[in-house]
Amino acid sequence: QKEVEQNSGPLSVPEGAIASLNCTYSDRGSQSFFWYRQYSGKSPELIMSIYSNGDKEDGRFTAQLNKASQYVSLLIRDSQPSDSATYLCASRGSSASKIIFGSGTRLSIRP
Amino acid sequence: DTAVSQTPKYLVTQMGNDKSIKCEQNLGHDTMYWYKQDSKKFLKIMFSYNNKELIINETVPNRFSPKSPDKAHLNLHINSLELGDSAVYFCASSQGTYNSPLHFGNGTRLTVT
């Protein structure tokens, strides 16, 4: 079992709609979770961090964490073509020094 | 005023050669990492150093040897390069606290022919 799992996609969403990206993790000791966006040929850039159960909003982005279900999600409201990228879910596990990534979900926003 | 910088950006070399990648961060972080991203975009941790001390060494061939002369620098030396080493190598840094995210360098695309 992979430590952090994501659906690889591609996920195709019409412009202006809500994109929903999901992630599950296996280490119950994981304390913090991150969403990164990666454009082709570029390095990952941090979008959101979340540490507590519930929702965290930042502009058009909302991260959701449910530790009981070991589930993290990212919602992108009013999707724009510039949101087309690969989204990487990551968790910092019970060994605080290690951040593990999922395999990423390719998101495509169609005009 | 780049936060995490790594050089070179591209590296093309032949099988059997030895090469190095350098990384420097000016964020004052105490932990640095090397990640490998394969052609399927999967980011896999290789090594982590905290204040110059190796704290994570994943299942990586002995041909890969990291070195951290100080907490702002982390280099990666690769001996006897193989075709399967072709990938993008990312350096990253963070504080060693549970809520600290990674800050990535721009990556080094290594192509072994």
Image (cartoon, coloured by chain):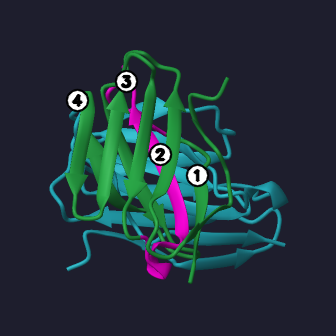
Chain colours: A green, B cyan
* Contact (Cβ within 8 Å) of mark 1 with mark 4: no
* Contact (Cβ within 8 Å) of mark 2 with mark 4: no
The alpha-carbon separation of the residues under discs 3 and 1 comes to 18 Å
- The residue to which callout 4 is attached is A52
Residue B76 x, y percent position in the rendering: 51, 56
- The residue to which callout 2 is attached is A89
Amino acid type shown at disc 1: Gly
Between B20 and B6, the one nearer to me in the picture: B6
Mark 2 residue element: strand
Amino acid type shown at disc 3: Ser
The alpha-carbon separation of the residues under discs 2 and 4 comes to 16 Å
* Contact (Cβ within 8 Å) of mark 1 with mark 2: yes
The image quadrant that residue A107 belongs to is bottom right
Frontmost of labels 4 and 3 is: 4
Q: Which label's residue is closer to the chain start, 1 or 4?
A: 4
- The residue to which callout 1 is attached is A104
Please indicate whether residue B82 sits to the left or right of residue B64 in the image: right
